[in-house]
Amino acid sequence: MAQATENLTAADSTIFGQLSKFDHEQMVFCNDNATGLKAIICIHNTVLGPGLGGTRFYNYANETDAITDVLRLARGMSFKSSIAGLNLGGAKAVIMGDPNKLKSEAFFRKFGRFIENLNGKYITAEDVGTTIKDMEYIKMETDSVVGLSENRGGGGDPSPVTAFGVYMGMKASAKETWGSDSLSGKRIAVQGIGKVGEHLVSYLTKEGAKVYIADVNQESLARVSKEHKAEIVAKDSIYGLDVDIFAPCAMGAVLNTENINQLKVSIICGAANNQLADEVTHGQLISSKNINYAPDFLVNSGGIINVYSELVGYNREIAYAQTENIYQQTLEIYRKAKEDKTTTHQAALTIAQKRIHDYAKVKSTY
Ligand code: NAD
């Protein structure tokens, strides 16, 4: 979470200063002494629909880090849902504290009560530090929760759908870069072989790519390497590998000046949220190195497409079909970035912001 405090200047260090910087609508602080719950729900924008975004449970160093993180994550959700064409706004929640010490049924039911009090304006889901079981406790108090297990009418783990979307974005990036979307024979480095990364590795090796994997979890590395015939590389050497594609599927803000300058790849396309440590500086640095960057919030939108499907009646086939559109959308982003002479990240952001802006005018008629 080192990125949590970046870009925070004295001028926007008040809560309202930070809310107004990127036009966030609402921030709700939830405190419960009995269970130890300390949560912050942040709603960035609800023009397209209720704000949907997961609940992150993390032992933040301080309140400032938690607030900065939830502001950044909520805004990211607005653009992710917008570009995916969903009728959803952007929001996120963070819970401060040690998940291993604090979790209980009462804890999550209390949090569910706070969500219920927002009358549907915020819908939660799983995120780092929370599980399907936690969502089921929340569900006992509110219907404003998705990402439930299949036997409870939910869509189950969205990670396989997310991985499929990243795969589609990667194939489109290959088409843009080499004229063919085949990944056969391409050398691809996957950083993080967790819930999404492993599914991605599976797609890639099945297509005949040579896949290199890095993770901090040695057990996962040994298992995934064996099951998918992927080659293990040291965690810190992954940026400098002589490969064609880098797929960040672990944590955010990995694309900083130092790491980008080590990359020898032609494409960056992965699942991690907020990959660019700084949207402008690092988007431009990647572009100046002639690397095709598939914007994270577009290519990893399969997960939100899958959980959105729960709100309208879950259908896995439809979720996959919608996620397949990421292929065409990624190609469109490359085209628009060239046309606008801008970075792919900015091109994607422009499309996402335009949809919100346009729909705000439609809404104003009643
Ligand atoms: P996960 O926790 O299952 O997997 C993350 C993996 O990264 C773990 O195996 C972890 O050990 C590894 N890791 C942590 N630090 C690392 C490091 N320094 N170097 C290499 N590996 C490291 O998470 P996930 O659900 O697979 O999500 C991966 C990323 O994709 C996250 O950034 C997440 O926010 C994003 N994302 C996930 C989904 C989804 O559907 N799960 C949807 C959208 C975005």
Image (cartoon, rainbow, N blue to C red):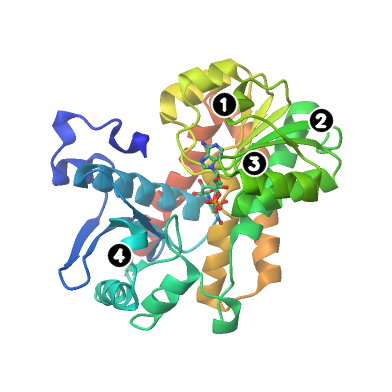
Q: Earlier in the sequence, mark 4 or mark 3?
A: 4
**Residue 168 or 87: which is nearer the viewer?**
168
Mark 3 residue crowding within 10 angstroms, few (<14) / some (14–19) / many (20+): many
Give the residue type that dot 2 points to.
Answer: Gly
Give the residue type that dot 3 points to.
Answer: Thr
For mark 2, give the secondary structure: loop
Give the residue type that dot 4 points to.
Answer: Leu
The answer to whether the residues at label 2 and label 1 have Cβ atoms under 8 Å apart is: no
**Location of residue 121 in the rendering, given as x and y in whole percent from the top left corner:** 32, 69
The answer to whether the residues at label 2 and label 4 have Cβ atoms under 8 Å apart is: no
Name the quadrant of the N terminus: top left
**Residue 14 or 196: which is nearer the viewer?**
196
Mark 1 residue crowding within 10 angstroms, few (<14) / some (14–19) / many (20+): few
Q: Earlier in the sequence, mark 2 or mark 1?
A: 2
Give the residue type that dot 1 points to.
Answer: Asp
Q: Earlier in the sequence, mark 2 or mark 4?
A: 4
Q: Earlier in the sequence, mark 2 or mark 3?
A: 2
Q: CA distance from mark 2 to mark 1?
A: 31 Å
Q: CA distance from mark 1 to mark 3?
A: 29 Å
Nearer to us: label 2 or label 1? 1
- 212 relative to 363 in the view: left or right: right
Nearer to us: label 2 or label 4? 4
Q: Residue at x 75, y 44 (%)?
A: 225
Q: Residue at x 28, y 35 (%)?
A: 5
* Label drawn at residue 330: 3
- The residue under label 2 is 179
**Residue 258 or 176: which is nearer the viewer?**
258
The answer to whether the residues at label 2 and label 3 have Cβ atoms under 8 Å apart is: no
* Label drawn at residue 102: 4
